[in-house]
Amino acid sequence: MKADIKVALTGNPNTGKSTLFNLLTGLNQKIGNFPGVTVDKKTGYCPLPDGRVAEIIDLPGTYSLYPKSQDESIVFSVLADPSNPHKPDLVVVVLDASNLKRNLLLYTQVADLKIPVIIALNMIDLADKGGISINIDLFAKKLGVPVVPISARKKEGIDKLKAAINFANKIALQEESIDVETIAPELIGQIGRELNLDNPYYALQLAHQHETIKFISPAESERIEELEKEFSFHSQKAQAAETIARYNFINDLLYDTVKVPETARDETASNKIDKILTHKVFGFIIFFSVLLFMFQSIFAWSAYPMELIADLFVWIQNNLHQLLPAGPLTGLLVDGVIGGLSGVMVFIPQIAILFAFISTLEDTGYMSRVTFMMDKLMRKVGLNGKSVVPLIGGFACAVPSIMSTRTIENWKDRMITIMVTPLVTCSARLPIYVLLISLVVPNRNVWWLFNMQGLALTGMYIFSLVSAIVVAFVFKLILKGRERGYFIMELPVYRMPRWNNVAYSMYERVKTFVLQAGKVIIAISVILWVLASYGPGDRFKQIEQKYQQPQYMQKLKPDDLNRAIRSEKLENSYAGVLGHVIEPVIKPLGFDWKIGIALITSFAAREVFVGTMATIYSVEGSAEKMETVQKKMKSAVNPETGKPVFSLAVAFSLMMFYAFAMQCASTVAVVYRETKNWRWPAIQFAYMGVLAYAVSLLAFNLLS
């Protein structure tokens, strides 16, 4: 889609910027990376009242144009680099109407870059509720920019904002907040003359950031460095002087335009709630109770839709076997592709419920409190308070969580966080845990309230967090670093969740899970079906001749005979040979050669385990009697012992293996991308593999 105007959204964290972005763009958006960095880039398109289309760019949240992380450095790069393809024609600065003093610092900096600006005065409903009175006309007049009051949560004022974007003047008319040239007049003047700049604040920013920004040449950066020495420029002192001047301007502005009561009701209510939810004892009890309820719900609420999806795939496979002629292509499609996909698609309801809870907890502001509570505990094991954000995010996926460690300034804290984040139970492990728990843990309640399967799942999640903390403590003793870490986090006021945002988050996460997992599973299912359907030499021919002998033909019923042939063919296939090669290594863990095949294929992605088991048992099973993967695995019998393959000991040994093993190619890739050194992903892969084998071995022997 071609855009007529580029609009950037910027603002402090927790101002509702992302909610506004979703409202303006709807589903017409995409997520990628800004060029050359791993920072997420969210762009979308918004139709304007006059028929034009605006491209909306959601810039990372920041408190200032002086960056403290890679995320924040992107904001200045996009706004100031004339050659940046995302440089906007217009900037919409999103302000929290209930916290204007803090928000306006960023606005004054952006406005001084002389890009046309509109202020979206968000959360105006909360400001009204808190008794905050804003003279919007006078506010706009003093700043010289359009000011549009909105409530993104209630979808109010969005049409007015679109109209303001529609009529935005491309010539910046906003009033200057401070006289920038008084901060470093000689330096600013000389940089402006030598680089042919007509904006003094732009010249000042180059003086501060020339060493890190990429859109000026090395020669220009060196010249700025020489000028700084010539004029005795001290960056931190200049920033402090600028900040003081800006807050003097902001204080005068707010004194004239905003009337605030002594206490805002929302903040008072939030403080009262925090006394309970962040209590040093009750806070943790409440948090673990929330986790317990969440995982109980995942089992209880998803049972019926999962059953429907499983039955649907069985129905599809049955009908396709009847409609299509028997042969390799039918087997590949029905037993390979559809059989493999069915094993993962059935877990869509549980993935959706998990992300609904996570999104709700984030939206209400509770997740920030969890981060705050865990800070002291994190410091004791050598982590920064900011490490909690990636660890909690690891419940969803390790890849974006590892990328989010960019906000951790301390090198040692960041490396430890990267090394332990994959230990936290991610959504890819959820299908494996649910499948194995449903096989060996009874589906009944204890104390009339807690479901045993839900308790087992909760235990796996808590176990993963504890494991990550213990391993972090070990890394604290190994890695050496002199920097001191610090933790600054704003606690937003408690709010009702935005249910449309929760629904959209569910949709996006499920879509990502299905598409990413689906691609890998289809590819591996096709390869696996070929490996399981063909064998070396004439083994398959010998098996068919063997079972044509009278002693088999007379003793076995037709169904039993066909099942015996399929089972022996699978064992002698290429996949079976591969499984038998690694079986001596994994047998002490309680795993047979079929599980061994799944362990190998799932090194691409953990969730492939379920698809692999579905494909293997589909190849081995009867085309006339299709069953769900759970039923097939539950009825599987070990030929040596005559007992179920998936006993309590085997199931928990397998879960322990998946709890620790680094079976995610995407995570390995992102660790390399973030550390720029293959040594770190190699160390991570090795230590997690050793831990996985040791803990799995211990679990199998204890439970056998």
Image (cartoon, helix red, strand yellow):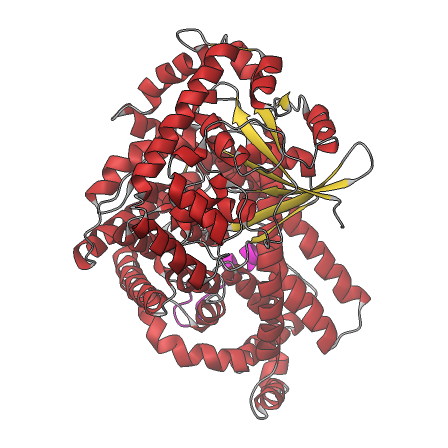
Residue name at image x 39 percent, y 12 percent:
268
In this view, the residue in front, 208 or 525, is 208
- The answer to whether one can see residue 450 in this image is no
User: For the magenta stretch, what is the residue range?
Assistant: 629-643
Question: Image quadrant of residue 566?
Answer: bottom right
Indicate left or right for 461 with 539 as reference: left
In this view, the residue in front, 45 or 651, is 45
Q: Is residue 516 magenta?
A: no
In this view, the residue in front, 158 or 385, is 158
Q: Position of residue 232 (x, y in %)?
A: 29, 46
**Height in image: 700 above or below 137?**
below
- The answer to whether one can see residue 536 in this image is yes
Indicate left or right for 30 with 697 as reference: right
**Height in image: 63 above or below 562?**
above
Question: Image quadrant of residue 263?
Answer: top left
Residue name at image x 45 percent, y 21 percent:
250
Q: Position of residue 261 (x, y in %)?
A: 44, 6
Q: Position of residue 31 (x, y in %)?
A: 60, 50
**Height in image: 351 above or below 628?**
above
Indicate left or right for 508 with 670 as reference: right
Residue name at image x 34 percent, y 75 percent:
585
Residue name at image x 74 percent, y 77 percent:
327
In this view, the residue in front, 402 or 556, is 402
Question: Image quadrant of residue 580?
Answer: bottom left
Quadrant (top left, top right, bottom left, bottom right) of the C terminus: bottom left
Q: Position of residue 237 (x, y in %)?
A: 30, 37
Indicate left or right for 594 with 621 as reference: left
Q: Is residue 630 magenta?
A: yes
Number of numbered labels in the structure image: 0
Identity of the residue furthest to the left in this view: 477
